[in-house]
Image (tube, rainbow, N blue to C red):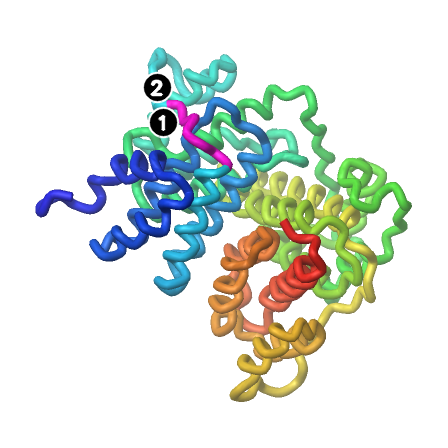
């Protein structure tokens, strides 16, 4: 690097250096750049550009890998530098192993006539990419998501599209793109492929809301409704069997009987809080990998819904998330006690967090949940939870963290979100200890 050259200007050369590395050379390469005080944010930006670059052979599994890596990159910005550099080294090795060197150079050429809407209607991916790049540069990512995710968009069940949009958008907020092409290309390409897919799932109809039932404790009411809903053996682990009008649709209509007086924000928060309680009380979790993918994606869909162009459109999108969420919990969470966990009376004491992490080390689930609910203050505990999830060999804990992280400001105290994430972390630690790891 030249003496007067800025760190930001070497983004493309950094990405090209990553591409030429072998996995066994990564640690030495990282050590070199640490000695030269390369900012971790600039290295993570170059790595993300390498991760999302189109490949000759792209599959759904690779797209999920990119989303998981994106969440890890988002998390290291608030973690310690030691953790951040270790995670970056791991991500570079993994990306080199699974993506190889089949990156397709960015060569975006298209006719500039028309607008983004007509480009999507034309079905030409090259034209879509050109107009999307242009709109994002001029108006920002919020205008992009609002314009191409209208309320009539089919429900993205069984896809990674919402998470791909959300991770790309959040990373774009952290740093500007390395070139004129924004980091949405992978999301745009995957979305365009899905919208033309013959396997696309028909969305559940939004329910007719009313206030016929007064639920004094709506969280408890919804948890009870889910836990008491009749289930058949073929529903276990089978999202497709649960996502239909007679199952998730019927349950959604039952919940809608007391929601007409709830605001959009409260309806979203209700779902996230129900999610957290169910993760604590369910005695059995079927396929943690799939469950965590869908819960994170549902949360991402709620986050995107806030970019809708009208309150009505946002409401429709929120109910789309509810249908998907209900099918997910019916498929992957066994019925539990149905009792919403309340934090113990009294204030947390000095040493409670130390006791929590000791209990976590011992995989003492009940003590961990009890102490986490007692501590209550999410912001006090959350960063440690996220750092622990960040270095887990399983992807599920970090996905669970990111299912709740966008909503931290909604309920910073006495929240069930940190305990829910800790439950999944213990669950995965036990599974890996039994030799069923990745």
Instruction: Look at the image and say whether residue 102 sits in the magenta stretch.
Output: yes
What is the distance, in whole Å, between disc 2 and disc 1 at their CAs?
9 Å
Q: Is residue 139 above or below residue 337?
A: above
Instruction: Look at the image and say whether residue 233 sits in the magenta stretch.
Output: no
Q: Quadrant of residue 196?
A: top right
Q: Determine crowd level at label 2: few under 14, some 14-19, many 20+ residues with C-alpha closer than 10 A.
A: few
**What number is the disc on residue 302?**
none
Considering the image in quadrants, where does the N terminus appear?
A: top left
Residue that label 2 marks: 108
- Residue appearing at x 44%, y 56% in the figure: 75
Secondary structure mostly seen in the magenta stretch: loop
- In the orientation shown, which residue stands out farthest toward the left? 4
Q: Quadrant of residue 128?
A: top left
**What number is the disc on residue 133?**
1
Q: Position of residue 287 (x, y in %)?
A: 73, 49
| Region rendered in magenta | 98-104
- Residue appearing at x 57%, y 83% in the figure: 352
Comparing marks 2 and 1, which lies closer to the viewer?
2
Q: Earlier in the sequence, mark 2 or mark 1?
A: 2
| Residue contact between numbered discs 2 and 1, judged by CB atoms under 8 Å | yes
Q: Left or right: where does residue 91 sit relative to residue 178?
A: right
- Residue appearing at x 51%, y 16% in the figure: 121
Q: Position of residue 180 (x, y in %)?
A: 29, 30
Q: Is residue 11 above or below residue 196?
A: below
Name the one closer to the observer, 278 or 288.
Answer: 288
Q: Position of residue 435 (x, y in %)?
A: 69, 56
């Amino acid at each position: 690097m030249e003496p007067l050259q800025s760190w930001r200007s070497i983004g493309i050369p950094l990405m090209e250096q990553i591409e030429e590395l072998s996995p066994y050379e990564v640690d030495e390469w990282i050590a070199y750049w640490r000695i030269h005080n390369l900012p971790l944010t600039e290295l993570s930006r170059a790595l993300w550009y390498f991760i999302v670059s189109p490949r000759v052979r792209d599959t759904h599994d690779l797209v999920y890998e990119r989303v998981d890596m994106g969440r890890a990159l988002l998390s290291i910005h608030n973690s310690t530098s030691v953790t951040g550099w270790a995670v970056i080294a791991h991500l570079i090795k993994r990306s080199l192993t699974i993506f190889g060197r089949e990156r397709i150079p960015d060569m975006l050429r298209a006719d500039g006539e028309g607008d983004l809407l007509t480009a999507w209607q034309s079905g030409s991916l090259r034209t879509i990419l050109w107009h999307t790049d242009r709109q994002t540069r001029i108006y920002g990512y919020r205008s992009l998501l609002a314009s191409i995710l209208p309320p009539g968009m089919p429900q993205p069940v069984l896809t990674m599209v919402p998470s791909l949009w959300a991770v790309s958008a959040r990373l774009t907020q952290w740093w500007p793109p390395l070139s004129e092409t924004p980091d949405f290309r992978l999301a745009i390409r995957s979305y365009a492929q899905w919208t033309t897919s013959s396997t696309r799932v028909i969305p559940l109809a939004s329910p007719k809301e009313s206030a016929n039932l007064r639920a004094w404790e709506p969280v408890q009411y919804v948890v009870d409704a889910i836990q008491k809903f009749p289930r058949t053996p073929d529903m276990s682990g089978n999202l497709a069997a649960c996502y239909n009008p007679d199952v998730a649709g019927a349950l959604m209509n039952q919940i809608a009987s007391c929601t007409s007086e709830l605001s959009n924000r409260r309806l979203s928060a209700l779902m996230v809080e129900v999610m957290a309680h169910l993760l604590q009380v369910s005695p059995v979790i079927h396929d943690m990998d799939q469950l965590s993918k869908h819960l994170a994606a549902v949360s991402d869909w709620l986050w995107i819904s806030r970019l809708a162009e009208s309150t009505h459109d946002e409401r429709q999108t929120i109910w789309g998330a509810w249908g998907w969420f209900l099918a997910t919990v019916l498929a992957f969470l066994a019925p539990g006690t149905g009792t919403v966990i309340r934090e113990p009376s009294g204030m947390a004491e000095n040493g409670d967090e130390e006791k929590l992490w000791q209990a976590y080390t011992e995989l003492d689930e009940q003590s961990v949940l009890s102490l986490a609910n007692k501590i209550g203050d999410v912001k006090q505990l959350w960063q440690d939870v996220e750092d622990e999830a960040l270095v887990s060999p399983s992807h599920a804990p970090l996905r669970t963290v990111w299912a709740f992280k966008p909503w931290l400001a909604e309920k910073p105290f006495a929240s069930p979100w940190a305990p829910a994430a800790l439950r999944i972390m213990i669950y995965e630690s036990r599974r890996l200890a039994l030799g069923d790891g990745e």
